[in-house]
Image: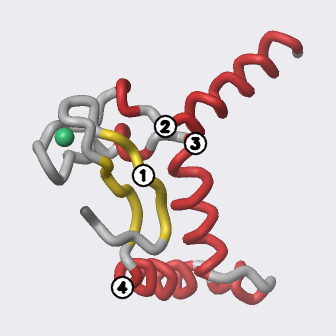
């Protein structure tokens, strides 16, 4: 399994193995450098690549089940991530959104 510095974990529906979605330390360093190079305005306002990386991989990606969107494969059995592999956080996030829609 990938040794991630930023990201989250999901369980394969086919074999039950735990999988990591995200970036290793080296990949994160590259992502951060790229982000800062592409977002000089935001950097001037005090934002950092670390913050962007953290926000995307530790918050937004998990809430959106990015591993399903990206059709990630299980490192162990090579099965593609399906909707059965949704994370609890994504389910929770969806239920919050549903409730907001019902009550608004
Ligand atoms: Zn598997």
Q: Which image quarter: residue 1?
A: bottom left
Residue at the far front in the pictured view? 16
Secondary structure at badge 3 equals helix
Residue at the spot 49% in from the left edge and 69% down from the top edge: 6
Residue at the spot 52% in from the left edge and 78% down from the top edge: 35
Determine contact: label 2, label 4, CB under 8 Å: no
Residue at the far top in the pictured view? 102
Determine contact: label 1, label 4, CB under 8 Å: no
Determine contact: label 1, label 2, CB under 8 Å: yes
- Residue 5 locus on image (x, y percent): 46, 74
Query: Badge 3 is on which residue?
Result: 63
Residue at the spot 46% in from the left edge and 40% down from the top edge: 65
* Disc 2: residue Cβ within 8 A of ligand 1's nearest atom: no
Q: Nearer the viewer, mark 2 or mark 3?
A: 2
Residue 9 is tagged as 1
Residue at the spot 64% in from the left edge and 30% down from the top edge: 92
Secondary structure at badge 1 equals strand
Q: Nearer the viewer, mark 1 or mark 4?
A: 1
- Residue 8 locus on image (x, y percent): 47, 55
Which circle's residue, 4 or 3, is located before the other in the chain? Answer: 4
Query: Badge 4 is on which residue?
Result: 26
């Amino acid at each position: 399994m990938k040794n991630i510095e930023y990201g989250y974990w999901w369980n394969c529906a086919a074999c039950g193995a735990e999988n990591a979605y995200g970036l290793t330390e080296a990949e994160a360093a590259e992502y951060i450098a790229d982000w800062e190079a592409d977002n000089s305005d935001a950097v001037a306002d005090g934002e950092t690549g670390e913050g962007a990386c953290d926000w995307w991989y530790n918050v937004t990606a998990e809430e959106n089940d990015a591993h399903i969107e990206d059709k990630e494969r299980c490192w162990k059995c090579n099965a593609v991530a399906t909707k059965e592999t949704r994370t609890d956080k994504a389910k929770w996030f969806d239920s919050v959104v549903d409730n907001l829609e019902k009550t608004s």
